[in-house]
Amino acid sequence: MNQTSEQVLEQVSRLVAGVLQKDSVHLQQDTRADQVEDWDSLNHIEIVVAIEKHFKIRFNFAELQKFKNVGEMCDNIVAKLVQA
Amino acid sequence: MMLFNELKGNLRKDFSEFQVKRIALLGDSATQFLAKAIKAYGYEAQINFELFEADFDQFDRQILDANSELYHFAPEFVALYPCVEKLWNRFTVTSHEQRSTFSDLIISEIHNWWQALANHSRARVIHFNFVECSDPVFGHFSTRTPVAFASQVKRINFELMNLAQQHKHVFIADLAGLAGQVGYAHAHDPRLYLTSKVAFALDFLPHVAKAVSDIVRAVRGNVRKCVVLDLDNTLWGGVIGDDGIENLQIGELGLGHAFDSLQRWVKELKNRGIILAVCSKNEEDTAKQPFLEHPDMILRLEDIAVFIANWDNKAENIKRVQQTLNIGLDSIVFLDDNPFERNLVRQLLPAVCVPELPDDPSLFVPYLVSLNLFETASFSEEDLQRTRQYHDEARRVEAQKSFPSVDDYLKSLAMVSQVRAFDEFSVPRVAQLTQRSNQFNLRTVRYTEPDIERIRGSDRFITLSFDLKDKFGDHGLIGVVILEKTDARTAFIDTWIMSCRVLKRGMEEFIVNQMALHARAGGLHRLVGEYLPTAKNKMVKDLYLQMGFAPNNGTWELAVASHSELKSFISAV
């Protein structure tokens, strides 16, 4: 079943909270990594790997470089899930 | 193996009960994740790692400068991880003429590091060898030309092995082997390397961290010494009591080859010096029959040092094995296909290592091999003799029953002991004993081979090694004493270790007599002994008292002039 960007956002929030070892993290479509406490470049790697595992997808190198905010990433995930 | 994300959960747990080990990590990639993984894996290995992480690519500056932060940190271990990805970059800017000797250049740099580390610290080095992969440009032809990168990497790894044999403080972590197990695609994620210079894929990190922990544990003396084996459906397919010997699945029958491969592996462990014991719910005669009569059995009865077949619970029987062999429960591995038995042993004897054997017997060996249960920090000729020594011991116990008194029995053994200063032949075994002995060990000071060499060459020390032979066989080198001349009158017993195999033979008394003799010969007046308690050496708590030493402010003294020889039936040769 196709997932909406909202549903994906909710799961991404949980995955981010998991990596950052917080009870919960409230992400919006326009949230940027630098606005979230502890979301540094190293944690970013873990977050990406956790998302890839969870959705069974893979971001390519270019995609990793270009996401400006959480929403762009979620849209990309949604698109990948449709193709799958 | 755990995933990195699961492993990371350990970081929130309490490490305070574990022994602290100071480890420095140097790499030419981003090592933050590796550092995290090492710290977190320490929880699995019961080690509280204190980490020093050098800045990126600081090998020369930290290692060659005796005043560097590295040496100020006073590490017990230094992990060196130059990554193959960086090596490749360097190779590509090497001139064509120098490519065929690229390995010499790298080896000489590494050799230089190892020597500097030995000069400036007592730390053990854990050096990661290079991940090997198919050649990026020559393909298979790389095996035929020395100017190919893959060929140079293999040469470097080969030379590292040779070099490590001459540097006893260095242990190679076989990254090439580990990456071979999981595959390069799982060991390295190019995106992580290109964005952040992280050279390991995240889920490969637990494997690498385990390698570090395994080596540290082995150096610390936490080694596994014995495998306790179940029989039915573990060592062979089927149930001997029900199916009969002719229907056992071993060799060509049924799943037989899966059990062959377990037996072949276990036999190799035995040949390496791991003791084998059997613990089976069976009648003894029935259980022994295949070992004696089945033509396809790889393990034979003489391979098994302790054979227990009865209907008691397995935890009781494992305790019997442990007492017979006089080893720690934490040095025992228990293999059983039955989850009930495994859980019972885990519950009652938590120190015993109980691998969760897969249901499919064809996976037994690959799974067990992946756990790397038998890491060691040394290997000597003595290891090869071990099973025979336990058989000799069983005959001694039998013989003892026919003598009216213990003294009569001891006399009948015709025991002789060779007492010698450490020499080049005994150094490896002496170091091994200091690393491995936990029970009969008065101060539990661990020494490496270079340490022992240093002590052997110093006037400050009197060194004594003891072997023991009797009419049943040769125990090999079983006692080590290091006396330090702390002042003109005093020999301080820095180290006194004995193998538990030779307890209650009068060896303790013999060693005291010899210490007194050598102290006197060195013009010294008194022996001073000290007992430093650990979790495992309670058996020697009162040893100095029993040996006639007098208490003095927490230490023990023996005046060698007035010392009258303690009773012993061992003659010195």
Image (tube, rainbow, N blue to C red):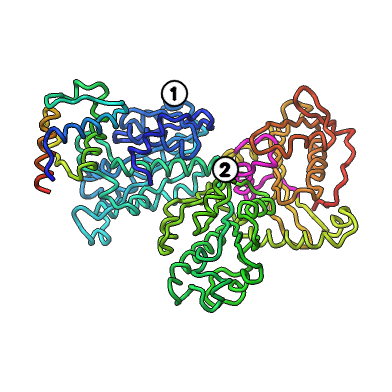
Q: Is residue B355 visible?
A: yes
Q: Viewed as shown, does residue B555 lie left or right of B337?
A: right
Q: Which residues are magenta?
A: B419-446
| Disc on the earlier residue, 1 or 2 | 1
Chain for mark 2? B
Front in this rendered view, residue B430 or B538 = B538
Q: Is residue B429 magenta?
A: yes
Chain for mark 1? B
Q: Is residue B406 magenta?
A: no
Q: Is residue B307 visible?
A: no
Disc 1 is placed on an element classified as loop
Residues behind callouts 1 and 2 on a single chain:
yes
In the displayed structure, B542 sits above or below B232; it is above
Question: What residue would you read off at disc 1?
Answer: B67
Q: Viewed as shown, does residue B229 lie left or right of B52?
A: right
Q: Residues within 10 Å of mark 1 (few under 14, many from 20)?
A: few
In the displayed structure, B542 sits above or below B300; it is above
Mark nearer the viewer, 1 or 2: 2
Question: What residue would you read off at disc 2?
Answer: B221
- Coordinates of residue B30 in the picture (x, y in percent): 29, 33
The amino acid type of the residue labelled 1 equals: Asn
- Coordinates of residue A34 in the picture (x, y in percent): 19, 22
The amino acid type of the residue labelled 2 equals: Gly
Residue at left offset 19%, top offset 32%: A10
